[in-house]
C-alpha cells in the first residue's frame, strides 16, 4: 500500500481540535438518552427556521445517534448523516434499517470531503456544533458553502459563550464562539446571514445561538 500524503500543519491542528471535542461522544454516552427524551419540546423552536428550506437533499452534521435525523427523515428526499465517530454511524444504520434514502459518512470531524460539490439543499446541525472549536466551525462553514447548491440554506446551532476557551470547563461544555464571530466567519466564507436568535440553554441565559444562512 502506498504511503499516504502527510497532513499539512493546518489539517493536523484541525484534526486535533476536532478529536478533542468529538471523540468522547460514543453511542453509550449517557447524554444521548437524556437528549433524546428531551428533544420534542425543542423541535417547535427549530421549525420556524426551516419553513422555507428545500428538503430535497438534507445533510445532518454530527448526527450522533440520529435524534435530529428521526425528525428530518420524513421531510427529506435524501438524507446524509455525518459523524466523527464510526460507532455513531453504525448505530444510525441499525436505527434506520438501511433506509435507501440515507447516506452514511464517518468523517474527519472538520471536513466533508466525501460529499459532492453543490449537492445539499439543506445543511443542518443542532446540539453538536456548540462543542466545536472555532477553527473547526469556520472549516465547516467553508465546506458548507462548497456542498450547498445555490439558494440552499444552513441551519446551525452554535455556542454564544466567550467566558473561557476550555470547553470542558464551560457551562454545558460550550466552546468559544459568539453570535457576532459566527456571522463574521459565515460572511468570510461566502454565506449570507439571514437570521440569528440567541437561545438560553439549561438555565444559562444567552448561552447559544441559532443561525440561518444561505448560499447565494
Image (tube, rainbow, N blue to C red):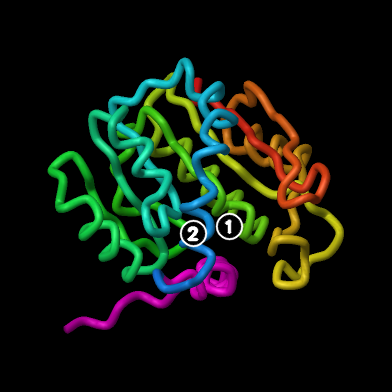
Q: Residue furthest top?
A: 52
Tell me: residue 32, above or below residue 24: above
| Residue 187 location (% of width, % of height) | 65, 32
Q: Quadrant of residue 209 in the image? A: top right
Residue 55: quadrant of the picture: top left
Instruction: Using the numbered discs, state the Cα–Cα distance from disc 1 to disc 2 in whole angstroms.
Output: 6 Å
Chain part drawn in magenta: 1-26
Camera-nearest residue between 201 and 23: 201
Q: Say whether disc 1 or disc 2 marks the residue closer to the N-terminus.
A: 2
Q: Give residue 110's mark.
A: 2
Residue at point 30% right, 44% down? 80
Q: Give coordinates of residue 63: x percent, y percent.
A: 41, 53
Contact flag, marks 1 and 2 (Cβ < 8 Å) = yes
Q: Residue at x 33, y 38 (%)?
A: 117
Q: Which residue is mark 1?
A: 136
Residue ID at (35%, 53%)? 113
Is 23 inside the magenta-drawn segment? Answer: yes
Is residue 209 located in the magenta-colored stretch of the structure?
Answer: no
Q: Tag 2, which secondary structure?
A: loop
Q: Is residue 162 left or right of residue 43?
A: right
Amino acid at each position: 500500500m502506498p504511503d499516504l500524503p502527510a497532513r499539512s500543519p493546518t489539517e493536523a491542528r484541525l484534526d486535533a481540535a476536532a478529536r478533542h471535542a468529538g471523540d468522547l461522544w460514543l453511542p453509550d454516552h449517557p447524554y444521548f438518552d437524556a437528549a433524546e427524551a428531551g428533544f420534542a419540546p425543542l423541535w417547535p423552536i427549530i421549525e420556524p427556521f426551516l419553513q422555507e428550506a428545500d428538503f430535497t437533499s438534507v445533510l445532518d452534521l454530527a448526527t450522533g445517534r440520529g435524534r435530529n435525523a428521526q425528525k428530518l427523515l420524513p421531510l427529506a428526499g435524501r438524507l446524509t448523516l455525518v459523524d466523527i465517530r464510526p460507532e455513531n454511524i453504525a448505530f444510525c444504520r441499525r436505527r434506520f434499517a438501511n433506509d435507501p434514502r440515507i447516506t452514511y459518512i464517518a468523517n474527519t470531524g472538520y471536513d466533508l470531503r466525501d460529499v459532492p460539490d453543490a449537492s445539499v439543499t439543506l445543511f443542518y446541525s443542532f446540539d453538536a456544533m456548540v462543542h466545536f472549536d472555532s477553527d473547526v466551525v469556520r472549516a465547516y462553514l467553508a465546506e458548507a458553502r462548497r456542498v450547498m447548491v445555490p439558494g440552499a440554506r444552513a441551519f446551525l446551532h452554535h455556542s454564544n459563550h466567550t467566558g473561557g476557551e476550555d470547553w470542558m470547563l464551560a457551562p454545558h461544555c460550550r466552546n468559544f464562539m459568539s453570535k457576532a464571530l459566527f456571522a463574521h466567519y459565515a460572511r468570510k466564507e461566502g454565506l449570507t446571514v439571514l437570521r440569528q436568535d440567541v437561545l438560553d440553554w439549561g438555565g444559562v441565559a444567552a448561552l447559544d445561538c441559532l443561525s440561518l444562512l444561505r448560499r447565494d
